[in-house]
Image (cartoon, rainbow, N blue to C red):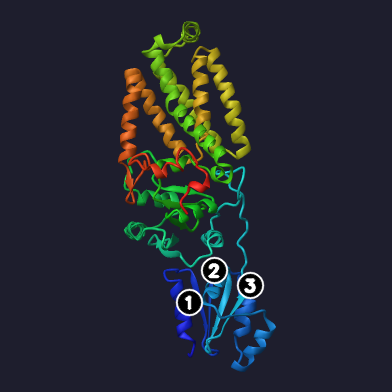
Amino acid sequence: MYINKNLSAHIKGRFDDCDDLVTKTFPELEIEVLFFGHLVGEEELNNNIVQPFSNIKNDEVKNILRRIEFKQEEDINSMVNGILEGKALVIFKNSLAYAVDIYVPKTRSVAAAEIETVIVGPKEAFIEDIGTNLSMIRRRIKSDCLKVLSYKIGTITQTKMYLLYIEGITSPVLVKELQERINNIDIKGINDLNQLIQYLDRKPLSIFPQYFTTERPDVSTSKLLEGRVICLLDGSPYSLSTPTSFFEFFQSPDDYNQRWILGTLSRALRFAALVITLFASAFYVAVSMFHYEIIPVKLLHEFIKSRSDVPFNPLIEALIIESIIELLREAGARLPSKIGQTIGIVGGIVVGTAAVEAGFTSNILIIVVSISAISSFVVPHIIMTASLRIARFIFIILASIAGFFGIIFGFIILLIHLCSIKNMGEYYFKPIAPLSLKDLKDTIIRAPYQFFKK
């Protein structure tokens, strides 16, 4: 073959470590074709490349070029950008290169996000096809700096996985660390990205998520631009990003798509909801068992009256009602969406009313638990919501043992735990611990874009 190896090698060098780049050769014609298989349409590829160049002679190639809309490319950057945009680059032996547009967007079946819904911004979400998911990221980042490393997870299932990062932005140490963890996974098979997370986790006993998952390609793109590593797994409609911090789980795409003041107020509301969902029920238990004196006199009379017929102490009462709320939540999640919503609303009203009328619990606790449950839904990330629900039960038990002192003790232990977690070389509670003033502009507040470093 007399393909221009210098041109071909240069193009492939620009896509070094991009395992999703496809090379197709026609030895008889001394032609090589480069393209991304997940960006092009199979029918378009067959009609415009495979069939025309199959079973023809060299002198017939010019006729094909006249018949098909090929555009001659002379600039290397134009060739690279063309491939990134879903074009096929045809390289001839005489160093000529032509690009033909056979891009077909993988917009299926690409539906709106069901969990991470937004008011303003893109609506599309990842699906179970890894090629489609990768194409949605490639469509947003048209750069040869976006690297894609391919893996097979599972000795039997051989599930395809892509590791994505941006060269020049992502730390090579981070990429190497994650590669080592992936290579050390020795299992028969894997079905979902959340299973992969558990194999990568170095703090399995912690109740808090240490890897950020999202169903939104725009969020994944933002993570890549911030220097994170993204993992895509075939069959999973999510992406994984690492390293992550505690505060990322309280951020929403709406924060960045709206005015900064609205984003800041929304975040403040979420952190207020965090405090309520963690401590509201524990506060009720502490006041009921140890600290009656802090209740205003008029409210104290109503408080005592509401508890006068309750046969349980505040701890048992709170645990029972919280458990009922969790049962309703679980039932609503397992049933079809419309029925699940009905079960959650009607079940909560019926059970709450019946429990108060029967003297099973106080009406004040029903209010407290309801507010606590509603506050947990304000947290954007569902996995963090589950972690906070577990922590809430721990604070309730501590409040029953030592009142406010138990809550304070638990809060200190919680802070120590969060500050001690370190994953992929970065602290989980950054930029609070260790303190980084320049990074505070995108944690509890969302500063204007002019304050962000370009």
Dot label at residue 11: 1
Q: Are marks 2 and 1 in contact (CB under 8 Å)?
A: no
The residue tagged with tag 2: helix, strand or loop?
Answer: helix
Which residue bears the numbered disc 2?
A: 84
Dot label at residue 316: none
Q: Where's residue 1, x and y in %? A: 48, 90
Q: Are marks 2 and 3 in contact (CB under 8 Å)?
A: no
Q: Which of these two is toward me, 352 or 389?
A: 389
Residue 453 in view in this figure: yes
Going from the N terminus, do you reach mark 2 or mark 1 first? 1
Going from the N terminus, do you reach mark 3 or mark 1 first? 1
The residue tagged with tag 1: helix, strand or loop?
Answer: helix
Q: Where's residue 262, x and y in %? A: 57, 38
Where 28 falls versus 374 (above or below)? below
Residue 340 shown left or right of residue 249 in the figure: right
Q: Are marks 3 and 1 in contact (CB under 8 Å)?
A: no
Q: How far apart in space, not on screen, are marks 3 and 1 (Cα)?
A: 25 Å
Which residue bears the numbered disc 3?
A: 43
